[in-house]
């Protein structure tokens, strides 16, 4: 692994996204790296704000509306495209979602931890709330703070590094196009191809869940309505 390709898929919720971008751009990295925002059909006003932020901060912005007419979410397209690019560069693919704020040393430490483990498929930073308590989607890791967990459960893509070895062994073109999200599938495939997934509760990142898709807050506030929408509208397929 010679480099790090950092990506953030974005769908509106620009205020939280700009916090994510600022934190990533402020990261202290001593490995060659790039940072790309994938704008997945945000509103025209929010797209304008992203373009203004790009001009100010210097990240790469890809408006998916320029390359596909497939409706959002387009996570599959992003994963397939970025896998090919990462493999060409022998780079790790680090996903930092738009409701996550990293510390300045998070990404370099995540890279170092993954690079030091030849059997690593996915290296993930644990998510915490504003008070520092481990939160969704890693609630099962509470009580295991300050540890490195050889994780048999699925790794979320909130803040995760997919290694080149994983991307060589598992072709993202085989992913099920009827689904919306792929962290569960890819986590399981990493184990299936003989790699290990590591969850670092030593590397907390602040996570404010589902800022980009407010309807998913219903999962906690009104679960009956959430599951009704999920199954009747075909939303949130994992």
Image (cartoon, rainbow, N blue to C red):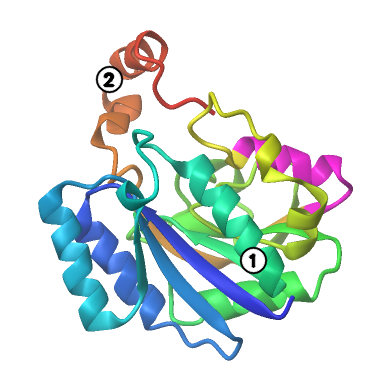
On the question of residue 200 being in view, the answer is no
Q: Going by the picture, which residue comes out furthest to the left?
A: 45
Q: Earlier in the sequence, mark 1 or mark 2?
A: 1
User: Residue at left 69%, top 79%?
Assistant: 112
Q: Relative to the observer, which residue lies in front, 125 or 49?
A: 49
**Position of residue 140 in the picture relative to residue 116 (left or right):** left
Residue identified by numbered label 1: 86
User: Residue at left 36%, top 76%?
Assistant: 59
Which mark's residue is nearer the viewer, 1 or 2? 1
What quarter of the picture does the C terminus occupy?
top right
User: Residue at left 86%, top 45%?
Assistant: 193
41, above or below 47, in the image: above
**Position of residue 216 in the picture relative to residue 203 (left or right):** left
Q: Secondary structure at mark 2?
A: loop
Q: Which residues are magenta?
A: 184-196
Magenta-drawn stretch, dominant element (helix, strand or loop) = helix
Snapshot quadrant of residue 46: bottom left
Residue 76 drawn at (x, y percent): 53, 41
Snapshot quadrant of residue 84: bottom right
**Position of residue 121 in the picture relative to residue 106 (left or right):** right
48, above or below 136, in the image: below
Q: Relative to the observer, which residue lies in front, 22 or 149?
A: 22
Residue 32 drawn at (x, y percent): 59, 86
Question: How much space separates mark 1 and mark 2, taking CA atoms?
Answer: 40 Å
Residue identified by numbered label 2: 222
119, above or below 173, in the image: below
**Position of residue 179 in the picture relative to residue 217 (left or right):** right
Q: Relative to the observer, which residue lies in front, 112 or 143?
A: 112
């Amino acid at each position: 692994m010679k480099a790090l390709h950092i990506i953030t898929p974005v769908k509106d919720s620009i205020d939280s996204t700009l916090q994510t971008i600022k934190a990533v751009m402020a990261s202290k990295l001593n490995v060659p790296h790039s940072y790309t925002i994938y704008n997945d059909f945000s509103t025209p006003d929010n797209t304008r704000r992203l373009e203004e932020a790009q001009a100010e901060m210097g990240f790469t912005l890809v408006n998916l509306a320029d390359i596909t007419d497939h409706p959002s979410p387009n996570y599959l397209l992003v994963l397939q495209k970025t896998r090919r690019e990462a493999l060409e560069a022998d780079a790790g693919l680090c996903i930092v979602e738009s409701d996550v704020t990293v510390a300045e040393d998070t990404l370099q430490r995540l890279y170092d931890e993954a690079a030091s483990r030849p059997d690593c498929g996915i290296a993930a930073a644990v998510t915490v709330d504003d008070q520092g308590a481990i939160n969704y989607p890693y609630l099962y890791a509470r009580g295991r703070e300050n540890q490195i967990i050889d994780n048999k459960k699925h790794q979320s893509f909130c803040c995760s590094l997919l290694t080149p070895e994983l991307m060589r062994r598992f072709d993202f073109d085989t992913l099920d196009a009827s689904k919306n999200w792929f962290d569960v599938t890819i986590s399981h495939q990493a184990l299936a191809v003989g790699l290990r997934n590591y969850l670092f509760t030593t590397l907390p990142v602040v996570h404010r869940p589902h800022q980009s898709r407010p309807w998913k807050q219903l999962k906690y506030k009104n679960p009956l309505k959430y599951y009704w929408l999920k199954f009747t509208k075909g939303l949130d397929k994992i």
